[in-house]
Structures are given as C-alpha cells and as structure tokens.
Amino acid sequence: MSGDLVFLIFPDAEFVESLSKALHASGLKVLSMRSEAEAEQVIATFKYVLPDVLITPLDAPDSNDNILIKLLNANPLMEQVPVVVLASGDQDQRRRALRQGLTDLIFPPYEFEEVILTTRLALERDRNKRPMFGSISQLSVPDLLQTVEVGRRSGTIVLSRRGAKGTIWFRDGIIVDGEIDDGRTGEAAVYGMAMWSEGTFEADFNPIAVPERISLVPSVMLLEAMQRFDEETRAFKERPRERTRPAVEPTSDDATTEQAKVKSPPARAGDGSRTLRQAPGARTESPRTTPIPTEVPTPLKLPGDAVTVHLALTLLNIAASYALRFLTPKLLHRRLELIKEKFEHRYPELRIFQVTPDGMVAIAFDVTVVLKPEEIAAATSEWLLEFISVMERTMPRRFTVERFAELTRPLHEEMKKQGFYRELGFDAASRRL
C-alpha cells in the first residue's frame, strides 16, 4: 500500500483537523475518529483495513476507550499495531505508560513536527519486528486475505495447521504465489489454504522479491473457493458411508478394563482441497484405508458476509477479473475509470473506490464521504451496468447481465439483503438464464 495509514483517535475536532492536515502533508494517510459514532462509521466502511499506527490519548475518555475496544473487536490484528500516545504532563501517567510497554509518548504542547517524527520512528521500528501472528479461529483466512486486498499490501502469510505449513505471497493486494509443504504450488496451494478453518498464521507486511507465478484477486479467489467448497460438501453428502477396520484391535486385557476406543487415523493436511480436484465420489485410496469423515468442514466466511461496501468491492472485481480475459489491464483501467467519472457527480459515494493500474478496484481512503448502504448499492450497480453495457457492445453475447448473474450466483442471497440484486435487475436476468 502506498503511504502508511494512521488511525487518529482524539475528541477535539479542531486539533484532529489540524493534525490530520500535517500528517497528510508528510505523506501519511489518516482516518480520524472523534466519537464512537465516527468509529462505527469507519469500522463499517473499512472493515478489512488495518492501520500501520494508532495515535490516541493515554488517559482517554470512556468514548475513546470504547473506540479502541471496537477497533480490536473488528480486527484482532489491531492489538499488534504500534501506538503513539498523546500523553499529559503527569509523571504518574508516564510511569503507567512505561509499565504498559508504551514508549512512544508525546507531551503537551503537541508539536506537529514531533508527532510526525515520533510516528515515523514507531513505523520504522515496527517494520523490523517479527511478523504479526494469530489464530485462524480468531481471524479467518478469508478475512486475512481481504485485509491484504483492501489495504493493497505486499508481503508473506505463513499458515500452519495439523503439522502442515503453507505460504502465500502477495504484492499490492494481489496473490502472486503459494505453496504447501505437501507439494502443491500456485493456485492449487492457495485454494487449499483458503479452506483451512483452524491453525495459526504469521503475516509479514514487507516487500517481497518472489516472481509472479499467479495473479489472484483475493475476493474473487474466495468466491471460487466457496464454489469448490460447495462441490466438496455435496460430494461428501453423496458419498456412501462405509465401515472402516479399527485402527487398533483391542486386546483381552484392554477389554477387561474398559471398552477400547476406535479412532480413525488423522486426516492428512490438505486432504479437503485435494479432493476438490476429483470428480464427485472419486476415491484416491482403497475403502479399507480411507477414513470416514465424522463431520462436514466448517463453511468459509464469505465475502458477502461483509458490509455493503465490501460486497460492492467483490462484485466490481468479479466483473474486472472476467473482463481481463478480453482486455489488457491498461484498457480495462481506462474503461472502468471513465465510467466511474461519469457517475461520480450523481453518486459521490463512488469516490470510496479507486481503479488500480492493473484494472482492479480497491478502497480509496476518503472519510469526507457519508456512506449509506442503499446509496452504495445504487451507485455500484449503475457503474457495473454501464460497464457491462460497454463490454456487450464491443463483444456481443460474451458479457451480459445474465452472464454476470451466473458468475455471482453464490452471492445472490447476500446481494438481495444489501439491495444489489434489485438494482442490477437480476430478477429479470435470472428468469432468462
């Protein structure tokens, strides 16, 4: 992501405005929160955005404490973001801060030059620290990858599960390679890890030097992973349940003390995604050695579970990814940008999006726009319909509303909830499919 992002939490509006301008002038991006209401708006709009640093008072009013709690609940990685404290001159406060491990303290009067310098020092020091880490049960793989996409981040994610290890490399929010230590690489590895619902992760958001073996937009990749998951679930439900031989035969001594427990051998890491490449019901091992699954894997947390703006981002990138089959990134960028500019005067909400040089759509940081779910749905739908119309005129029958409805079928229920289904005219389009 170009330009480090600061979350500025402070109750005084005049101070926030002045400090934000100074931080912007120094090359930093700023999202400010002066109240719980503003914090909720930021969290709803930028659900998957992770700041590079937090600036906040130490002895904050209750509302500021609640803001920090809300931010942490929205993204567990927030706990590992460096904090610059706008402290008072109280010596007891300084000692409390040091006991809490907070060393980046700024005392009044808050000189903007000192705030900027301290912030940049905190950022540079944090880059030299070990990667961020956490549990997949707290922050799912889909949420982690969408954090990467929305923030346009570069770096490496290392996932560990049941003794298996996998790595995903990404550049500017796009997945460029992946591998699992069972031998899978590229797309096969990435789709396999997208299904992991347990384990741990380490995320290192620093530039990478690996070559671009693949190019996957996380939100679009997750939609495909969801479809593969559905196929795997159906295959599991249709698979005949067969008995397996006990892994360990009980001895007579065992029988006299307690009933021996029969356990299936543990599944190899990656088995779920390996079977995705098979026909439904296909087997890779004999009935005697293949363990019977005891439960259906936990479903993915889908992109459509996010708030309206992130569903809009997913739909836009599905359309862009499909269009890349027929257009160069440069031409796609131009078409999307021209259409966006055409509607911006009517829908200022579209300023929340930016078209990247590679023809994809990302979040732009602009908190001056008041966002309403119904307006986001209307604005995005107008943009998409005009883009589909332009594509259809140049390539008849290849890019229609019906085709887009088919591409986004797994998201239809969420689209109905958020208002996209009606705005895009999918009721009529689906009847013609």
Image (spheres, rainbow, N blue to C red):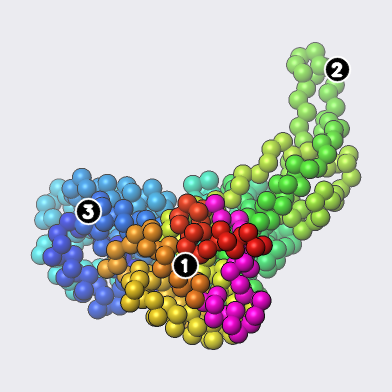
Magenta-colored span: 387-413
Could you tell me how far apart the alpha carbons at marks 2 and 3 are, in whole angstroms?
Answer: 70 Å
* Residue closer to the observer: 95 or 206: 206
Q: Secondary structure at mark 2?
A: helix
Q: Type of residue at label 3?
A: Ser
Question: In x, y percent, where is residue 104?
Answer: 25, 61
> Which of the two marks, 2 or 3, is nearer to us in this view?
3
Q: Earlier in the sequence, mark 2 or mark 3?
A: 3
Q: Earlier in the sequence, mark 2 or mark 1?
A: 2
Q: Earlier in the sequence, mark 1 or mark 3?
A: 3
The residue that label 3 is drawn on is 35
Q: Type of residue at label 2?
A: Ser
The residue drawn where x is 83% and y is 31% is 246
Q: Residues within 10 Å of mark 1 (few under 14, many from 20)?
A: many
Q: Taking the image as drawn, is residue 107 in sight?
A: no
* Residue closer to the observer: 21 or 98: 21
The answer to the question of whether label 2 and label 1 lie on touching residues, with beta carbons closer than 8 A, is: no
Magenta stretch contains residue 330: no
* Residue closer to the observer: 128 or 45: 45
Could you tell me how far apart the alpha carbons at marks 1 and 3 are, in whole angstroms?
Answer: 32 Å
The residue that label 1 is drawn on is 381
**Residue 210 vs residue 83: left or right?**
right
Question: In x, y percent, where is residue 421?
Answer: 51, 59
Q: Secondary structure at mark 1?
A: helix
Q: Secondary structure at mark 3?
A: loop
The residue that label 2 is drawn on is 252
- Residue 329's disc number: none
Question: In x, y percent, where is residue 321?
Answer: 59, 73
